[in-house]
Amino acid sequence: MDEPTTPRTAVVTGAARGIGAALARRLGAAGLQVAVLDLDAEAGEPVVSELRDAGVRALSLGADVSDEDAVAAAVARCADELGPPTVLVNNAGIIRDNLLFRMSTGDWDAVMGVHLRGAFLMTRACQAFMVQERWGRIVSVSSISAQGNHGQANYSAAKAGLEGMTRTLALELGPFGVTANAIAPGYIETDMIRQTAERVGEPYDQFVARIAEGVPVRRMGRPDDIAAAVEYFVGDDAGFVTGQTLVVAGGLTSA
């Protein structure tokens, strides 16, 4: 297809910190306009300010991705102020870890709501613009926990569902020039990993060192490791790659 006359617009969910913030920075550096979406718009302002200082057109959006009306409003505002969102990265996530017999219905619903319902709502809202433009890139952040992980029945189920949805989106949207792929990170140094260390009752530095010993490359991942993979998937060079899940885990294949 012809090169766009204006920069493409990307929406990154859960982009106020951690992996999401790294994704926003990477996509901005790659020449995209970026909508930084998080639960609270104010939380995303530091990332937006950083992007604008680097010459990137950026916008902070606040929305609960599991809320249909909030998602519709946020995506509409993005389209009005930055342009049609033809790149979507579904990154928003939470954890509510526990063994099955201790897991509450609320914790199950919360995790499924953010990871799976949220990705569905965001994708449904953005794909309309992608189909109209006859070009689009959808990347969803899954996890090696999709293969199963102790104490994460909710999280693992949500991530496995995300990968299944990705394969279906590839089939449905491919004829319109839209690709859909997933990234499955391993252990990445983020606030979520800190929460995991707290859950198991281990000092963070000790937890990181122990996990790194079990990773073939002998380190934990960094948010930029995931951002680099996402940058490939959203680029024109990946136009013939769709329906795939790329494991970015330093050699680990499961949690």
Image (cartoon, helix red, strand yellow):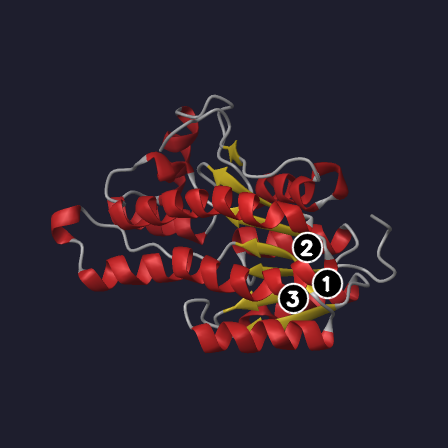
Q: Residue at x 36, y 62 (%)?
A: 113
Q: Position of residue 85 (x, y in %)?
A: 67, 63
Image quadrant in which you'd find residue 16 = bottom right
Q: Amino acid type of disc 2?
A: Arg
Q: Which residue is mark 3?
A: 35
Q: Position of residue 9 (x, y in %)?
A: 72, 62
Q: Distance between the Cα atoms at labels 3 and 1? A: 10 Å
Q: Which residue is mark 2?
A: 25
Q: Distance between the Cα atoms at labels 1 and 2? A: 7 Å
User: Mark 2: which secondary structure?
Assistant: helix
Pair 3/1: label in front: 3
Which label is found at residue 235? none
User: Do residues under tags 2 and 3 come within 8 Å of each other at their CB atoms?
Assistant: no
Towards the viewer: 153 or 86: 86
**In the rendered image, is residue 207 in sight?**
no
Towards the viewer: 159 or 137: 137
User: Mark 3: which secondary structure?
Assistant: strand
User: Do residues under tags 1 and 2 come within 8 Å of each other at their CB atoms?
Assistant: yes
Q: Distance between the Cα atoms at labels 2 and 3? A: 11 Å
User: Mark 1: which secondary structure?
Assistant: helix
Q: Is residue 157 left or right of residue 177?
A: left
Which label is found at residue 51? 1
Q: Is residue 66 left or right of residue 54?
A: left
Q: Amino acid type of disc 3?
A: Ala
Q: Is residue 239 above or below residue 37?
A: above
Towards the viewer: 218 or 73: 73
Q: Is residue 198 above or below residue 70?
A: above
Mark 1 packing: few (<14 Cα in 10 Å), some, or many (20+)? many
* First in sequence: mark 1 vs mark 2: 2
Mark 3 packing: few (<14 Cα in 10 Å), some, or many (20+)? many
Q: Position of residue 31 (x, y in %)?
A: 79, 54
* Residue at far left of view: 101
